[in-house]
Image (cartoon, rainbow, N blue to C red):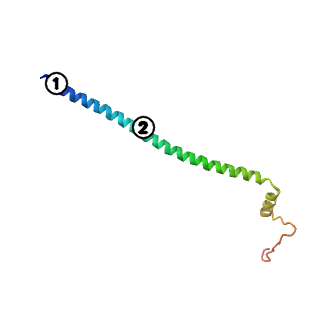
Amino acid sequence: MKKTNRKKFNIGKSLLIAGVIYFVFSAFFGVFRQIGEYNSQISVVNSEIKEATKESKRLQEEKVNMHTDENYKKIAKKTLGLVEPGDKVYINSNDK
């Protein structure tokens, strides 16, 4: 009778150990999967930061170049119709 109790105890012990090992491995795999997802999210955010930095530099250069006489003349020509000496002016006779 002792042998069957021992076999039941050994089987129960083996099942308990197998269950603990399964739980530990599944916990580790879950953590590794999450780490992989976080790494991919970090890559996306880093590329967004890189693009935003490029855009910021471009806007800073545009801001510096905005306050030049040449740019003021360009804006005045477009919006106000500025004409400088030597410019060719075409007048549409159909406009009234």
Q: Is residue 16 left or right of residue 74?
A: left
Numbered circles on residues, count: 2
- The amino acid type of the residue labelled 1 equals Asn
Q: Residue at x 78, y 77 (%)?
A: 94
Give the x, y percent position of residue 25: 35, 36
Q: Secondary structure at mark 2?
A: helix
Q: Residue furthest bottom?
A: 93
Badge 2 local density, few (<14 within 10 Å), some, or many (20+)? few
Badge 1 local density, few (<14 within 10 Å), some, or many (20+)? few
Label 1 – label 2 distance at C-alpha = 39 Å
When the figure is inspected, residue 76 is found, relative to residue 96, above or below; the finding is: above
- The amino acid type of the residue labelled 2 equals Val
Q: Residue tagged by mark 1?
A: 5
Q: What is the number of the mark on residue 55?
A: none
Give the x, y percent position of residue 71: 79, 58
Q: Residue at x 36, y 37 (%)?
A: 26
Q: Are marks 1 and 2 in contact (CB under 8 Å)?
A: no
Give the x, y percent position of residue 21: 32, 33
When the figure is inspected, residue 90 is found, relative to residue 67, above or below; the finding is: below
**Which badge, 1 or 2, is on the more N-terminal residue?**
1
Q: Nearer the viewer, residue 80 or 69?
A: 69
Place residue 4 in its image quadrant.
Answer: top left
Image quadrant occupied by the N terminus: top left
Q: Residue at x 40, y 38 (%)?
A: 30
Q: Residue furthest top?
A: 2
When the figure is inspected, residue 3 is found, relative to residue 86, above or below; the finding is: above
Image quadrant occupied by the C terminus: bottom right
Q: Secondary structure at mark 1?
A: helix
Q: Is residue 86 left or right of residue 10?
A: right
Q: Residue tagged by mark 2?
A: 31
Place residue 73 in its image quadrant.
Answer: bottom right
Q: Residue furthest left?
A: 1
